[in-house]
Image (cartoon, grey):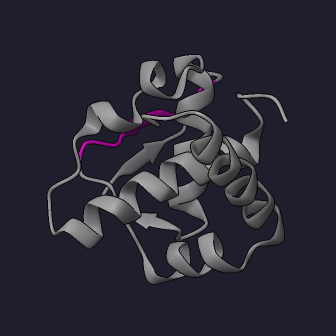
Amino acid sequence: MADNDYFKVVYRILDTLYAYMQEGLPVNPDAISAEALNIPEGYRREVVANLLEDGLVRGGEAKRYLRQDMPLVNADSLRITTKGVEFLKENSNMRKVYNFLHGVKEIVPGI
């Protein structure tokens, strides 16, 4: 599965937000930046906009303008929702990504 696969990016964002929630810490926006995800900024904006529209995250805002191809996204205060946690835990594609990443963690120390 490619690093920029949509569901892998969604998983990484949701997993990061969930980890911050479990620790009771405010989310560091840099943790879900395009650089951290190793994807283009426009792609990240689309993914975050979809997560907001689908109710998997809250605390951000995505605005779509007719003259722009990509939405403008304010993602500095994102939080995962209950629906996002359920999606993370139950979605079969997410489970495949989790299993893949979990296997990588066992093979590569320090991840």
Residue most toward the left? Answer: 25
From this viewpoint, is residue 29 visible? yes
From this viewpoint, is residue 66 visible? no
Q: Residue at x 61, y 53 (%)?
A: 11
Q: Which residue is drawn at 71% across and 28% down?
A: 3
Q: Against 71, is 81 above or below?
A: below
Q: Which residue is drawn at 74% across and 66% down?
A: 95
Q: Quadrant of residue 20?
A: bottom left
Residue 93: % across, % down: 82, 61
Read off the magenta span: 70-76
Magenta segment includes 91: no
Q: Nearer the viewer, residue 23 or 49?
A: 23
Q: Which residue is drawn at 23% across and 50% down?
A: 27
Residue 29: % across, % down: 27, 37
Could you tell whether 39 is left or right of 35 in the image? Answer: right
Q: Against 41, is 10 above or below?
A: below
Q: How many marks?
A: 0
Residue 106: % across, % down: 60, 47
The N terminus sits in image quarter: top right
Q: Which of 71 and 30 is in front in this view?
A: 30
